[in-house]
Amino acid sequence: MPAITRWFIKAGLAYFLAALLLGVILAAPAVLAIPPAIAVWGPVYVHLLMVGWVTQLIFGVVYWMFPRYSKEKPRGSEGLAVATFILLNIGLVCRAIGEPLNSLWPAAAWGWLVMLSAIVQWLAGMMFVINTWTRVKER
């Protein structure tokens, strides 16, 4: 298993646990009298599950298991895969920070952090598609 695949899968597992913990915390206000402002973390919960867990798991497995690109570069560009991993995770962390702050203080500049996170994650997605596209082949 390539190192970048392990990075994607281990990061995905970590985000999965973080999302589950956040899910428990989001469910707790009704029982533990936690302030309702905790609800601003709802979008982060979904993002941790879908981008942090599901997307990273898919990216890692695709990089590892899809048909070879060539004999010299069986998985395409390793540099592009590493850049995908880095940008996806930078975007995810920026989103996890910016989303709740923007919800609590919309007049502040936190919206720019959310927009930056979206752009960085879009770039990561584009890199993943560029690196994977030619590996989708007919037998």
Image (spheres, rainbow, N blue to C red):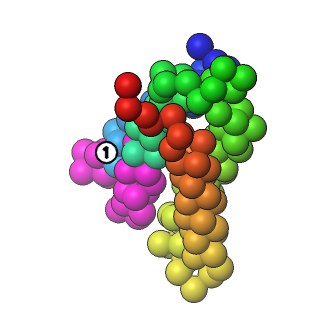
The reply to whether the magenta stretch includes residue 34 is yes
Q: Name the residue under label 1.
A: 28
Report the number of discs.
Answer: 1
Q: Which residue sits at x=70%, y=42%?
A: 80
Q: In which quarter of the image is residue 58?
A: top left
Q: Determine whether, in the image, residue 120 is placed left or right of residue 79.
A: left
Front residue of 115/82: it is: 82
- Residue 112 relative to residue 51: left or right: right
Q: What stretch is highlighted in magenta?
A: 27-49
110 with respect to 14 (left or right): right
Q: In which quarter of the image is the N terminus?
A: top right
Please tell me which residue is depicted at 66% across the width and 50% down the height of the picture: 87
Q: Main secondary structure of the magenta part?
A: helix
Query: Which residue does the image show at 40% across and 42% down from the upper left?
Result: 49
Asked whether 53 or 58 is in front, the reply is 58
Q: Residue 124 location, x and y as percent?
A: 60, 51
Q: Which residue lies furthest to the front in this view?
A: 139
Q: Position of residue 11 (x, y in %)?
A: 57, 31
The amino acid pointed to by label 1 is: Ala
| Quarter where residue 91 is shown | bottom right
Q: Is mark 1 on a helix, strand or loop?
A: loop
Residue 88 visible (yes or no): no
Residue 50 appears anywhere in the view: yes
